[in-house]
Amino acid sequence: MNRILRNNIMEITGFFMIGLALLLFAHSELKLLLTLPSSLLNLNTIFLSILIEALPFVLIGVLIAGCIQIFVTEEHIQRWIPKNKFMAVIMSCIIGALFPACECGIVPIVRRLIGKGVPIHAAIGFMLTGPLINPVVIASTYMAFGNNVKIAGLRMGLGFITALLVAFAISRLFKGNQLKAPIRSGSSLTNKKQHSFMNRFWSMLTHSIDEFFDMGKYLIIGAFIAAAVQTYMPARALLETGSGPGSSLLVMMGLAYILSLCSEADAFIGASFSSIFPLSSILGFLIFGPMMDLKNTIMMLSVFRWRFVMVVLLLIISIVFFTLMLVQTFI
């Protein structure tokens, strides 16, 4: 525990200062005394909502990452992942579709999987399908659109195709793990019988805590930037530009990127635009947002090389856009 405190003293101090600031902002009498501008109070509210929504999923993500670090060995990965690139991509996308992850917590899981030997193309396939078409997201989409099987099915099918195409493209464009820095592997306790389960459990918690403080600061930065953009960017002007099929699709994709919503809840926001934009644009909102949003981009930039993140972002934008433009006459 002392080692954890020493290694993360700056992060702990930062979290403490943020908590103190939030406490002060929450005090109603102090608000009256400070007479802060309404835009700043609105920024604070949006920032808090994004942070509160994302933190539970980040905690789940780092706990899973800790379990992978301690209980999963490189030998397990080599047995589970096919050698063939195309089969590895397909398998990773299927596993991601069954894995109830949120984009808020998927980055630490993917980083740990790559550190254990999962190839980058398979990791990207898992990262894209996990938050987008897992059972929880599909169920929430079905309910948000009034028990509409068509929209839930289109989100699942088109999202899966997009993830496959992006992961296949990554397999052709990049080699190596694309991490900015090698992951400290630590001691693997999986096959050492002399270590008790409690020792392994404590080691898993230690890795999870390190992972949380490592990723948490980038989540805070991303949440603040997303809140600032939402506060000071004229949303009405953005919506007014979406008059045609192509422009409305780009507007909804941009809105999904800026809002940085949790994938378990974004369908309810998307449903509110159903009377304004066509179905293809709504699907752009539902598919693009969970794959890549503003706060997720910041978290990915903290883990992966800048060029790799930009290529992934451009691939997702182009494939989602052209896929939906092609199918919009059939849906």
Image (cartoon, grey):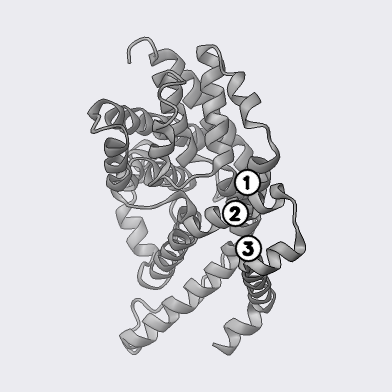
Can residue 187 be seen in the rendering of this structure?
Answer: no
- Dot 1: element: helix
**Looking at the image, is mark 1 or mark 3 nearer the viewer?**
1
- Dot 3: element: helix
Check disc 3 and report the residue beneath it. Answer: 217
Q: Which mark is residue 45?
A: 2
Residue 181's x, y, as percent? 63, 60
Indicate the quadrant where residue 158 lies: top left
Q: Which mark is residue 9?
A: none
Type of residue at label 1? Ala
The residues tagged by marks 2 and 3 sit, at their Cα atoms, a distance apart of 19 Å
Q: Quadrant of the C terminus?
A: top left
Q: Which mark is residue 226?
A: 1
Residue 223's x, y, as percent? 60, 52
Type of residue at label 3? Lys
Can residue 4 be seen in the rendering of this structure?
Answer: yes
**Looking at the image, is mark 2 or mark 3 nearer the viewer?**
2
The residues tagged by marks 1 and 3 sit, at their Cα atoms, a distance apart of 14 Å
